[in-house]
Image (tube, rainbow, N blue to C red):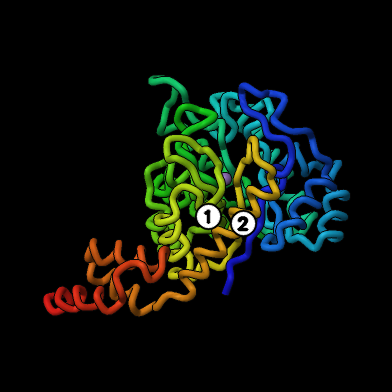
Amino acid sequence: MALKLASILGSFGNRSDRYMTGGYASDVSLEGLFDSVTRIPELSGVELVGTWQLTADSVAEVREHLARTGLQPVSVIPDLFATQTWGKGSFAAHDAGVRRAAVDYVNEMAVLARAIDCPCVCIWPGQDGYDYPFQADYAQAFDWFAEGIRACAEAAPDVRFALEYKPKEPRNRSFLSTADRSTLFVKAIGLPNVGVTLDVGHALEAYESAAESVALLQREGLLAHVHLNDNYRLWDDDMIFGSVHPVELLEFVYWLRRTSYDGWCSFDQYPYREDPVRAIGEGAKWFRALEAIVEASDDDELDQLLRRGDAAEATAVVRRLLLGGGGASVDAIGAVGGRVEGGA
Ligand SMILES: [Mn+2]
C-alpha cells in the first residue's frame, strides 16, 4: 500500500530568506498555489499555514479550492513563528499574556481546521526556545509549554495535535528539539489527541537516525504526522527528499512500513531557487522509488538481517537494494549470515 503524499501549500509560493527578504520569486494567489499542487500527480493532500493561507477571512475560499481540486486537507499549521506577537516565544513565552494569546490563537485554528474538515493541527513552536545561556528557565518553560498545549487539546478533543520538533532556527536552541524530548513533552501532557510530527530533515539535523525515531515514536503510539525533505545535517536546508541521504531515507521508509504507519507524509521542502513543481515533484518520485524498493524487498530477509546485526551484510543488502545486481548476490550474503546465525 502506497502511503498518502501531500505538501505544504506555501512551498509553491514565493520563498524568502534573511538576505533576499523580498523573496526569490513572486507572490502566488491561493488559486495558483492549489493549481501547482495538482500538477504533481503523486500528491493528494495539502497543509495550510495560518496567516498565510488559512484565516477566518479565507476559510470559504479555501473550502472552494479543496472542493475544486479534490485535494485533502491534511493539517493546519498555526502561524506561531511569522507574526511579531510570537517573536520571543508563544506557548513558552515569558509574558503570560503572550502565552494566553497562543492558546487562544491555536483554539481558533482548531475551529478553522474543523471548518475545512481537516483532522490535524500541526504545531511547530518555532519561536519557543532561547538564544543565550541563562536566558531561559528550562524547567518552567517545559511546564508552560505542556500546560498550553494541554489547554488546546482539551478544548478540541476531536482534533489531533501533532507537535513538530526541530533542534534550532529561528531560535538558536528550541525547547521542542528532538524525538526523545517530544516524547517527554507529550507524555507530560498526557492526552490521547496529542502526538508528534516527525520532520525527517529536523531529525537529521538533530543527528538522529530518522528510522530509529520512527521506531521510537511508533512504539509509543505517538507518530501523528510526517514531513519530508532532506539536508546536509547542519541546517534545515529543506532540500529535495532523497537528494542527499538516500541510504538513511531508504531505512526511514522501511521503518514507516515496518511499523505500519498509515498517516500522511507531507513534503516540507523549501525550494528557494528551484521551480517548486519540479523540486517537490522530484521529491515525490524519490519517495515512491524508495517505497517501491521496500515493497519489493523480502520482509523475512530484512527481518533476519536485523536479527543478525552484521554490519557488512547490512551494507551489502542496501547496496543491492539501491544499486541492483552490481553488488553482492543474495546467496553470497546468505552464506555470511548463515554462519553467524548458528551462534545467535
Ligand atoms: Mn516541517
- Which three-letter amino acid code belongs to the residue tagged 1? Gly
Depth check, front residue: 318 or 38: 318
Whether the residue under disc 2 has CB within 8 Å of ligand 1: no
Depth check, front residue: 20 or 211: 20
Where residue 313 appears, as percent x and y from the top left, is 25, 67
Decide: few, some or many residues near mark 1? Use Cα within 10 Å; few <14, some 14-19, many ≥20: many
Picture quarter with the C terminus:
bottom left
Depth check, front residue: 240 or 265: 240
Q: Helix or strand or loop: what does disc 1 sit on?
A: strand
Whether the residue under disc 1 has CB within 8 Å of ligand 1: no
- Which three-letter amino acid code belongs to the residue tagged 2? Arg
Where residue 339 appears, as percent x and y from the top left, is 14, 76
Find residue 281 and report its image quarter. Answer: bottom right
Q: In this view, does 68 lie above or below 101?
A: below
Q: Are marks 2 and 1 in contact (CB under 8 Å)?
A: yes
The label shown at residue 185 is none
Question: Which residue is located at x 60 percent, y 47 percent?
Answer: 268
N-terminal of the two: label 2 or label 1?
Answer: 2
Find residue 64 and report its image quarter. Answer: bottom right
Q: What residue occupies the far left of the structure in this picture?
A: 343
Q: In this view, does 219 lie above or below 148?
A: below
Decide: few, some or many residues near mark 2? Use Cα within 10 Å; few <14, some 14-19, many ≥20: many
Question: Which residue is located at x 35 percent, y 63 percent?
Answer: 319
Where residue 71 appears, as percent x and y from the top left, is 76, 60
Question: Which residue is located at x 86 percent, y 41 percent?
Answer: 57
Q: Say how many tags the image has.
A: 2
What's the CA distance linking mark 2 and mark 1?
7 Å
Find residue 109 and report its image quarter. Answer: top right
The residue that mark 2 highlights is: 160
Picture quarter with the N terminus:
bottom right
The residue that mark 1 highlights is: 195
